[in-house]
Amino acid sequence: MNIKVCKFGGSSVRDSSQIKKVLEIIKKDKNRRVIIVSAPGRDEKFDEKITDHLLNIATNGEHFSKQKIYINIKQSFDSIINKFELLCTELNIDKKIIIEDLKKDLNNTVLKNKKREAFFLSRGEHYNSKIISTFIKNSGLNIKLMLPEDFGFILDDNYCNGKIQTISHQNIKNKFLFQKDEIYLVPGFYGITKDNDISVMSRGGSDLTGGELAYALDADIYENWTDTDGVYEVDPRVIKGANVIPRLTFKELRLLSSKGFNVFHFNAMLNCKKGKIPINIRNTNNPEHKGTLILNERVPMEDLVGIAKLDNMAAIHIQKDMLGDEIGFTAELLKIFGEYNVNTYHYPTDKDDISILVDQEDLKGNINNLRRDIERRLNTNSIYVSYNLSIITLVGIGLRQNTFTIVDAISALKENNISFDMFDMSPSKISFHIGVSQNVSDIALETLYKNLLKI
Ligand code: ASP
């Protein structure tokens, strides 16, 4: 059977007019048989996501106050109730039982700590799925609501960062039988522990629910419906008129997303990659657009598919005579960064020098002690830190065959008088990184885009 698993994110289900678009999308293709929905995302009237309001109540207002957002728990409570009441009214659904149950859940005082947080966090998906499935059923489709607690979507007891347990895949196979024209609707993000407590995955976790269902059911495709036409060649906020990439591999997306392209939850790709299930990023607001297909393999028609840019980076240059000959030097150095919880991105190295590229945010409050530890433990000659760098990453599996693209990139920068601080080719040869000063990074990106990607 050709099954399409479709996940609709928060922006696609944030209000009644979006939910009506979801219905049209489902109706358009009878293979869309498994639908996963998020909690309502931000809209014009409600500035914060419902999930954040829920977490705010669970944490007694700490969730917003920590971010200097002044919304107290009473306001969060009212926002949640108003949102779901409005959805019911506008979608013509009897709200009595739904709102009564929701209020009961929001007044829960029995659960404590992480169990309480996980339970509250899950309620957005839980009630939104009830409302959306009722609305779709009323339109005449044979839709069945499948709650994680009913079909056995089992997570470990990490509560707010739950990981799927493999037994869930068999449970899904046993319960999703696709009788006649049956369509299934599943709330994303949450599951249950083996002791029947609610547990949620990490934030953005509805993507993960979709990935697990697609894998377990060996779906033909996993459609990820969101509010953008797909993955862009370059950040469209910086480069107006940038195109959507029609096809790219998991590896290419991984390289782009770790460098500032935030498309969707990376872990959701792992199972799809394992099961060779293509992921299709689609736009709920522009359903005619074919979006971006993410595949295990593709014919490398073009050398380059995308250019990502990561700002606010710092490079720590370390100099010590003959460090390249000192066994264990780099291991010890990286260990020190690990002790300060600083993630290291790249480390170009030479006989007497090494540079470590990090997110400069991670150095806040750390740099003084980090430098002192490196100096003392590794007996270095000098350490120099450059701040406000941007790393521009060019990605494409075709680069492996055509390494001269690198020459074109450097020539384009030269012609525009843009100097660079760092250059590094990845071992896989499908991406290379150019470090430039942040104040010229937008110009550098535009130059590379115009010379290498724009047709
Ligand atoms: N509602 C959850 C969140 O905001 C999960 C999701 O939308 O995927 O993180």
Image: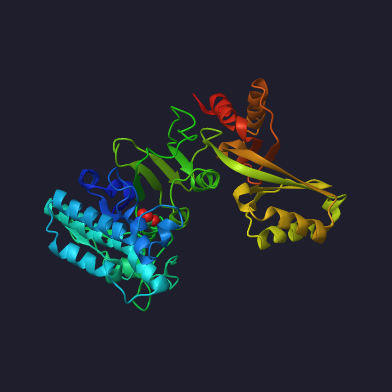
Q: Residue furthest bottom?
A: 195
Residue positioned 38% across, 53% down in the render? 70
Q: Residue furthest right?
A: 321
Q: Is residue 79 left or right of residue 168?
A: left
Q: Is residue 43 left or right of residue 368?
A: left
Where is ligand 1, by quadrant?
bottom left
Q: Quadrant of residue 55?
A: bottom left
Q: Quadrant of residue 156?
A: bottom left
Residue positioned 64% across, 55% down in the render? 365
Q: Is residue 47 left or right of residue 383?
A: left
Which one is in front, 178 or 389? 389
| Residue 317: x %, y % from top left | 75, 46
Above or below, 234 relative to 29: above
Residue positioned 34% across, 52% down in the render? 49
| Residue 9: x %, y % from top left | 33, 50
Which one is in front, 253 or 360? 360
| Residue 141: x %, y % from top left | 15, 53
Residue positioned 16% across, 54% down in the render? 88
| Residue 29: x %, y % from top left | 24, 45
